[in-house]
Image: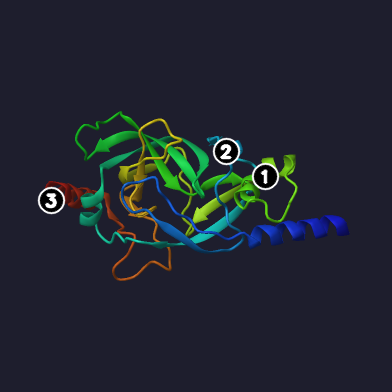
Amino acid sequence: MKKILISTLAAICILAAITAGYIYIGSKHDRSTVARSSQKDKVAVATSQSNKPLETTKQDSKPLETVINNADFDRMYTNLDQLVRDADVIVEGQVIETSYFDFNTETNTKVLLKVTKSYTPNIKEGDILTFVDLGGITTEAAIIRSNNNKFNQPIGEAEENTKVQVLFDGVPLTKVGEHVLYFAAAGTINMLPEKHYIPLGAFQGKFTISGDSIERYAPKDMQSPRYSSLKMNKADFEQKLTDAVRNKK
């Protein structure tokens, strides 16, 4: 029992000691984030040995360890006009599939979205687009390898099979069946062969639709008179968005 307790404490200490920066390079627009702190540990990119997507359309029955990282942003999007100005695509749709992968010190969620409404020319209802959200699920082994295993921790089957959920600023992971609207830029992640898009400002360009309401996730420490969830009635949102698209310069 003592040995198990000591091993568990040692593993927690090792994970808690892992700290590094998150730099996202998958978009032509700024989505740079720098992780300031983590409640538990730092999840970074796996080596090429573990760079394969982690398919996760099914929910795990066992609760996952959760890592919450705080991020600094180079750009804040405080209104719809700003989002429209920088977006390559603006589409509404339903999430039909998700999977996870590590790339350049980040854990990501690959989202397949079936478009139900498009504000972008050449994209129509029924099209299926790929988006990449910041945050996702990785493994304990990937954490160890990303830190070059400086603690010389053994990597075995348990570490390879232990999943860890990575959230940025507490933003929930995208799930199959969700109804969402994206303001996104064209991505350039070389490990993804298909054309893909990245929400502006990490999660700032992703809105969740629930009934007649639409809003984006706004962490408490980001909320201010300038930055908010932009929550509003969906009909009002659509009218303002249509006007912003029409007036885009």
What is the three-letter code of the residue carrying label 1? Answer: Thr
Left or right: 14, with 36 as reference point: right
Please tell me whether mark 1 sits on a helix, a strand or a loop: loop
- Secondary structure at numbered mark 3: loop
Quadrant housing the N terminus: bottom right
Q: How many marks?
A: 3
Residue toward you, 215 or 12: 12
What distance separates the C-alpha of mark 2 from that of mark 1? 18 Å
Q: Is tag 2's residue or tag 3's residue first in the polypeptide sequence?
A: 2
How far is mark 1 from mark 3, CA to CA? 49 Å
Give the class, few, some or many, for how many residues have Cα within 10 Å of label 3's Cα (few <14, many ≥20): few
Q: Secondary structure at mark 2?
A: helix
User: Disc 2 vs disc 3: which is toward the camera?
Assistant: 2
Please name the residue shown 55% across and 38% down the image.
Answer: 51
Q: How far across and down, in percent of the image, does residue 145 sit?
A: 63, 47
Q: Nearer the viewer, residue 22 or 140?
A: 22
Q: For the point 29% across and 35% down, which residue is it?
A: 116
Read off the residue under disc 1.
Answer: 162
Of all residues, the one furthest to the top in this rendering is: 126
Is 114 on the left or on the right of 98, as rendered?
left
Please tell me how crowded label 2 is: few (under 14), some (14-19), or many (20+) other residues with Cα within 10 Å.
few
Q: Position of residue 147 (x, y in %)?
A: 62, 53
Amino acid type for the residue under numbered disc 2: Ser
For the point 61% across and 40% down, the residue is 60
User: Which residue is tagged 2?
Assistant: 48
Identify the disc placed on residue 249: 3
Q: Residue at x 21, y 31 (%)?
A: 122
